[in-house]
Amino acid sequence: MRGNILREQYDDLKRRIDALNVEQRSVCFSYIKSTYGPVNEGYELASSADRERISKELRDVSHRLWSVGNRPQALALGVLMLNIESQLTPGDDAAFVKQATDALIKEGIV
């Protein structure tokens, strides 16, 4: 069930990233590059309670960024959030989201 929701969220996120112009897309992937390592490392080392807090904080920051017009950065955080959550969610849809967000992160890091 949760995997299906992750898949729907990914499809929406990917559509929005694909609609970015070249400059916005560059900002999005630069933000992925600058935030992926710290977010991923912190999440891996966190307890389950801290993981919930990290996820909530990422969502809150993403919503604030979106609200003030920093949509490329908000989308980048969306990629990171889906990547993190899909690691811990069973099922084919979650596995797809993990693989797809890994590819987006790799695109941002290269």
Image (cartoon, helix red, strand yellow):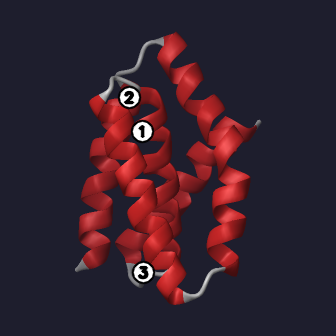
Relative to the observer, which residue lies in front, 99 or 80?
80
| Marks 1 and 2, how far apart at CA | 6 Å
Relative to the observer, which residue lies in front, 21 or 48?
48
Image marks 1 and 2: residues in contact by CB distance under 8 Å:
yes
| Marks 2 and 3, how far apart at CA | 26 Å
Residue at 45% of width from left, 56% of height from top?
Answer: 58
For label 2, count other residues whose C-alpha is less than 10 Å away and answer few (under 14), some (14-19) or many (20+). Answer: many
Residue at 53% of width from left, 80% of height from top?
Answer: 50
Is 4 rendered above or below residue 97? below
Q: Earlier in the sequence, mark 3 or mark 1?
A: 1
Locate the C terminus by quadrant.
top right
Label 3: which residue? 89
Left or right, 39 with respect to 79, comes to right
Q: Name the mark on residue 75.
A: 1
Per the image, label 3 sits on a secondary structure element best described as loop
Please, which residue is most extreme toward the right here?
Answer: 110
Q: Name the mark on residue 56.
A: none
Type of amino acid at the residue the image marks with label 1: Leu
Image marks 2 and 3: residues in contact by CB distance under 8 Å:
no
Per the image, label 1 sits on a secondary structure element best described as helix
- For marks 3 and 1, give the one nearer the viewer: 1
Residue 69 screen position, x and y as percent: 34, 23
Type of amino acid at the residue the image marks with label 2: Arg
Image marks 3 and 1: residues in contact by CB distance under 8 Å:
no
Type of amino acid at the residue the image marks with label 3: Thr
| Res 95 visible | no
Residue at 54% of width from left, 60% of height from top?
Answer: 99
Label 2: which residue? 71
